[in-house]
Amino acid sequence: MGASFPVVLVVLVAVLGSLYQLVLTPVLTISGVLRQVDPLNNEGCRFVPELEGCEKMVHLPQSNLLYLACSRIASRPYWMPPSGHLNASSKALDDHIAMYNLDTGKVTRLAIESDYIARRGLQVHGMDVVASTSDPTRLFVYAVNHREPLTGDPALTGADSAIEVFSTTAGSSSMEYISTVEDSLILTPNDIAGFPDGKSFYFTNDHSVKLGMYRKLETFMGLASTNVGYCHVDHGCKVVARNIRGANGIAKGRNETVFVASLGGGIYVMNQQADHTLSHRDTIPSGGLPIDNISVDQDGAVWAAMFPRGIEIVKRFADMSKDAASSAWRFSKNVDWSSNQKYVAERFFEDAGPIAQGTTTVVHLPERRELYLTSAVATHMTICKI
Ligand SMILES: *[C@@H]1O[C@H](CO)[C@@H](O)[C@H](O)[C@H]1NC(C)=O
Ligand SMILES: *[C@@H]1O[C@H](CO)[C@@H](O)[C@H](O)[C@H]1NC(C)=O
Ligand SMILES: CC(=O)N[C@H]1CO[C@H](CO)[C@@H](O)[C@@H]1O
């Protein structure tokens, strides 16, 4: 009898201990409440105000063009399915793909002539732009479209997300709609890595369910519950990697390598197999910081936008008057033989908010010695010398 009390206590301590481990530690790291912002390279930056609310940006290799998926930040607190905002009555009506000329600074919104897009709308998020193998002047644009469902209340059904494929030529001011890929596996699509055939792509699902409590829980507890899918316009979709913690940005590297950024921390390094399944080769650690969208520069290094204080971006999605810090990191293979670390993580930029607001994508152009920072919640694109 007398023994039961301490046993209960021990069990309680054990439960609390693992709760701390499982719940509190990830929550503290993801929300970044304990981390100080340490400004770096945020002086001498310039702004491009025409590029508002651009979640994702892609540099077309060997060109002077950036392509961006942009929206209006005023609508983010209403329609932004990835962050659980599902009031379609105030969704932005002019989401678009923009083109930015690095030499002239000119911004062009790509026009789309399509009855389908006019009818279903375009609510952009992740995107990729890839040159065709058969005709390198032709570009394929793959874009996540968080469509409003045709019937029912989105707050009860979730968004009816799909992936749209467009075609354009480098420098053109319009793009042509080619196809829509809808599939039950395209559940909560986030980012895309497209193939040069205009017909197939990898995509990440950032959650395992569209709605409900479990959706919040899996992110904050860093559960390995999300996946990566592969679709071919003619053959449908399949899951090619499962058990990923908060799959987010996805980018192709050299030699059949695919990188998947994890909101739970770290970058998964995967190998593409002949059947397009991805085998997990390695994980690049990020010191527990959540990683958002990633890009690969011409030297093969991975650039990541990270939120030094993740809680701030959550707040900014709901209230654009709140600042959200940004940081940009480079992850590369270690070439220093005197160190036994496999990867090197280097911080290149950090700002508390006004200069780069909650950066979601960073692109590094080594030959220009410049960093380009954009965000779903920023009033402008930021360009900084490094
Ligand atoms: C959706 O947004 C509109 C404002 O655009 C507001 O009037 C309405 O109450 C909102 N609906 C819900 C369910 O919050
Ligand atoms: C890619 O493969 C080529 C040839 O197999 C090799 O020379 C090169 O070092 C590889 N590059 C990387 C980044 O692994
Ligand atoms: C493709 C893409 O933009 N992915 C993520 C980028 O960052 C925002 C902000 O956190 C995420 O919501 C996106 O899912």
Image: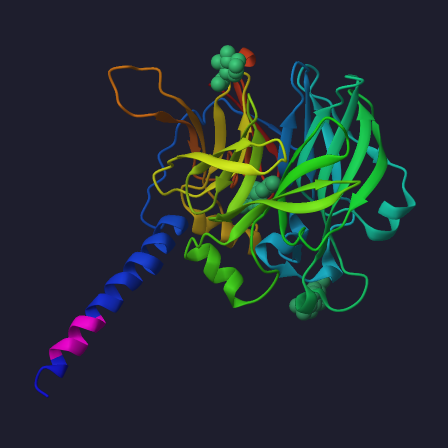
Magenta stretch contains residue 266: no
Q: Residue at 42% of width from left, 39% of height from top? A: 266
Main SS class of the magenta portion in the image: helix
Examine the rendered structure and indicate whether residue 190 appears above or below residue 141: below
Residue shown at 69% from the left, 66% from the top: 157
Q: Identify the image quadrant of residue 380.
A: top right
* Residue at point 50%, 54% (across, down): 225
Task: Give the camera-side residue of 358 and 223.
Answer: 223
Does residue 271 show up? yes
User: Would you say 14 lies left or right of 34 here?
Assistant: left
Q: Which residues are magenta?
A: 6-12
Q: Position of residue 99 (x, y in %)?
A: 73, 27
x and y percentages locating residue 365 in the rendered image? 56, 18
Q: How many marks?
A: 0
Which image quadrant for residue 124? top right
The reply to whether residue 366 is visible in this rendering is: no
Image quarter for ligand 1 equals bottom right
Residue farthest to the front?
A: 274
